[in-house]
Amino acid sequence: MIYFNSDYMAGAHPEVMQRLLDTNFEHTVGYGCDQYSERAVELIREACDAPKAQVFFLVGGTQTNATVIDGLLARHEGVLAPESAHINVHEAGAIEATGHKVLTLPHCEGKVRTDEVENYINDFYRDETFLHMVAPGMLYISFPTEYGTIYTLGELEALSRVCRKAQIPLYIDGARLGYGLAATECDVTFKDIARLADVFYIGGTKMGALMGEAVVVTNGTLLKNMMPLMKQHGALLAKGRLLGLQFDTLFTNDLYMRIGRYAVELAITLKEEFTARGYESVVDSPTNQQFFRLPNDLVDRLSCHVGFELWGPKGETSSVVRFVTSWSTTKNDLDKLISLV
């Protein structure tokens, strides 16, 4: 079998794994107070041009979203998010379990429009009964989105303006941030993300780490008590150096972006090959996730040799499927997939 199910199926990128092996017998203090975590913090600050940013290392994406959103919201507030958002669809109600409602917005291929956000906030406060309702306390978006699409710099700037006008935080889920930034059509940088978002996270789990995400807080008025909040949510790792060391490695010698560029290059080749064979690309994704509508007989035949995901229920005659590339995808894997189509 070859695997295109997701970008976290293999262990860790060899450079990350080698660092873990090389330091395995070292003894360090816990909870991210070690020298590797401190160096990783400085490397991330440098990449983001945010020397005063706070950086925290958490164990996984769902814990990260639940922890950050719980910390940003008052008890009566909810989080604005696209209907397709990971926190709304694929996190088993983790946000609601913390006592906060996900307030969904229409989306276009995973992206929310600025006017939809602004209208929701304005309409909420125009309602004379708003004190009895869940208030929009923040905006959550993903970069890239669940559909592999990316916001332009202009779109992010507009969303940031709306949030700052409404005095609510903009939070960006960056589980696959490197794949978005590596897209050839992307005009957004780490520095832009840090400038426009109040809080965001840099994904490690899907970007070559064994596990771990790096939360970056650029708005110093927020998340003042992040460490105990992380512990309450089961997101604080006692052996914190294992997370810090991985991000130290990912942000040394441009590894994080090298991983992103490599996976995106393979994904675009995959898209071109499927399209050349007449198969419909249902989303114009420039990142490492590619979506196609395939006849069910091909889906069934491929599933005997290839791992991939059905994107929603299987259709009567055809189905939408998702293929995902990563650092562990080889060109031989891609060639084999194409030969089976």
Image (cartoon, helix red, strand yellow):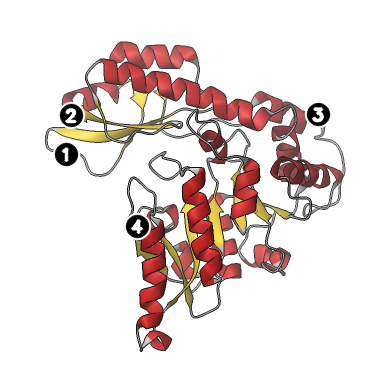
- Which numbered disc, 3 or 1, marks the residue closer to the eye? 1
Asked if the residues shown at circle 1 and circle 4 are in contact, with their CB atoms under 8 angstroms apart, the answer is: no
Residue ID for mark 4: 83
Q: 24 left or right of 76?
A: right
Q: Looking at the image, is mark 4 or mark 2 earlier in the sequence?
A: 4
> Does residue 125 lie above or below 275 as drawn?
below
Q: Who comes first in sequence, dot 3 or dot 2?
A: 3
Give me the C-alpha separation between circle 1 and circle 4. Answer: 22 Å
Above or below, comparing residue 170 to residue 25 in the picture: below
Amino acid at dot 2: Asn
Local secondary structure at mark 3: helix
Residue 327 visible from this viewpoint: no
Q: Amino acid at mark 3?
A: Asp
Q: Classify mark 2: residues with Cα within 10 Å, few (<14), some (14-19) or many (20+).
A: some
Q: Residue at x 87, y 43 (%)?
A: 27
Mark sitting earlier along the chain (2/1): 2
Instruction: Determine whether the residue tagged by mark 2 lies in a helix, strand or loop.
Output: helix
For marks 3 and 1, the one nearer the N-term is 3
- Is the C-beta separation of discs 4 and 3 under 8 Å? no
Q: Secondary structure at mark 4?
A: loop
Q: Are marks 2 and 1 in contact (CB under 8 Å)?
A: yes
Name the amino acid, label 4: Glu
Question: Dot 3 corresponds to which residue?
Answer: 22
Image depth: mark 3 or mark 2 in front? 2
- Per the model, the C-alpha gap separating discs 3 and 2 is 47 Å
**Residue hosting label 2:** 296
Disc 2 versus disc 1: distance between alpha carbons? 8 Å
Image quadrant where one finds the C terminus: top left
Between the C-alphas of marks 4 and 2, the distance is: 27 Å
Label 4 vs 3, first from the N-terminus: 3
Q: Is residue 112 left or right of residue 173?
A: left
Quarter the N terminus occupies = top left
